[in-house]
Amino acid sequence: MKEVIENKLGFWFIDEKEYSGMLSFSQDDGIHVTIISTDMKLGLNNLESFPIITGVTENGEPITLVNCKVFNSNMSMRNIGEGFSTCVEKAIIRAEYMLEGMFFDSIEDIKFRFLMGSYTDLDEWVDLSGFNIQRTDNEKDDFDYLIKYKSPKPIIFKINPETSVGIGFSIHGPKQSIVQKEAKIQQTCHLIVQGLNNPIELSELMKYIRWFSLLLQIGSQRLTYPIEITGKIDKSDKPNLVQSQYVQIYFQPIEASRELGYLIPPEFLFTFNDLDEGIIKTWFNNYSTLRVMVNMRSTLFLHDRQFLENKFLDILQALETLHSMRFKSRCIDKPNFDELREKILSCLTKKYRKIFAQRIGNLNYLSLQDKLSELIRNREVLFSKAICNIDGICKRIIRTRNLIVHASSSKKPLTTREMVYVIELLKLLFDSYLLEKIGFSKEKYIPMIQKKIDEYLKWGIVFNK
């Protein structure tokens, strides 16, 4: 995925016509083919769409472009002399996916036995190595080592009757030569999604691989980028294949990858080794209910280019939504409140009854301050060292929120410095509920969050007023 393709020549087959053109790909600009024709046969001026476009690059590599759209098309004419002129048609076609290594006749035909993807931070998150390096006791020779390697076995979980997911490993090397000056073995981890009974459509596999990468992203607490996505077609699934076929899959990620600092396993919120079959099944089979929380976390917490006020308001919005999913939002049950509401309205004159009829209903809903207080009190065992006065800090948070949203004057709002630290604590509060929702037991998620709070206490503010 990181490899940039610039203007690679090839032939492209569109509606049974053959064109020459140049293929390009980058994570910033996606996939596009520039088609140029001088014989007036292009005919792509209507910005058409094509489910499939196939082609062959200059080095003979078969390519299938999926979900294609003519991005722009134009024609230019130039007179080059008396009675002579040239006409050139040019079209730029963009694609959602590029499959390198095989032709496909239709979108329905694009199915794989399994999909494997390598991602940033994945090797460190998995933290499983097949290397055993020993230095022998030899005082005369400082470079006497015994190095053994055995590939770890794949770790697979069956999440439903049709699909399994897990971690696989690929190994490159060692290279052998007549004069052996080095021996290099490189191990790489992959996320795997596999069809147990039949091949699975690309869109379904990509959905599962994306969900898996989001679990990695929560564990690393930063954005995760795809490095390489590969699909495998078993020869048993395609009788015309001599051997199983591997297909490289290119697409434009939501955000182009950027260089990240190196993480070691203790720095993760959790690693793959902290997961079990129950958590994996909960994650994949209940993702529709987890999606809102996961998307809020990804959108609100993992982007640095936000104003402090936006971060502050965003985390409060996320926690308010979380409270609605986790706790009751009403003070009393609706039937009891409806009865009370009618009693109150019956005491008012017709004029005031009309004014307050709708507004009285809002009195039964908890305020944002009440919701925030309940969320923190439910995690008091975790946050007691960082937040000594729950009511006090909740009042100041709401005052600051009102100051930003309503431009209202408030006594003792949070200072800019305090807002920075409050945001960090509220992020940990959110993560504690997300881990619980994913399926981590108290015995597991409390130490995870406690470790982060202990790190915070080394540099953050303790709120005791």
Image: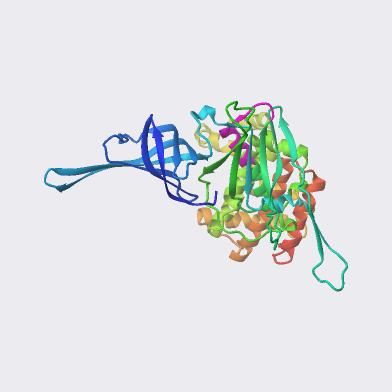
Is 194 or 171 nearer to us in this picture? 171
- State whether residue 299 is above or below residue 357: below
Farthest front residue? 178
Quadrant of the image containing the C terminus: bottom right
Q: Is residue 224 left or right of residue 5?
A: right
Residue in the image at 63% along x and 63% along y = 418
Q: Position of residue 225 (x, y in %)?
A: 59, 50
**Is-magenta flag for residue 270?**
no
Along the line of sight, which residue is nearer the eye, 248 or 415?
248
Residue 257: percent from left, percent from top: 55, 53
Q: Which residue reaches farthest bottom?
A: 140
Asked if one can make out residue 388 in the rendered structure from this viewpoint, the answer is no
Q: Is residue 201 magenta?
A: yes
Visible residue check, residue 461: yes
Q: Which residues are magenta?
A: 196-211
When the figure is inspected, residue 179 is found, relative to residue 107, above or below; the finding is below
Rendered view: 70 above or below 146 = above
Side of 35 relative to 126 (left or right): left
| Residue 26: image location, x then y, percent | 48, 50
Number of marks in picture:
0
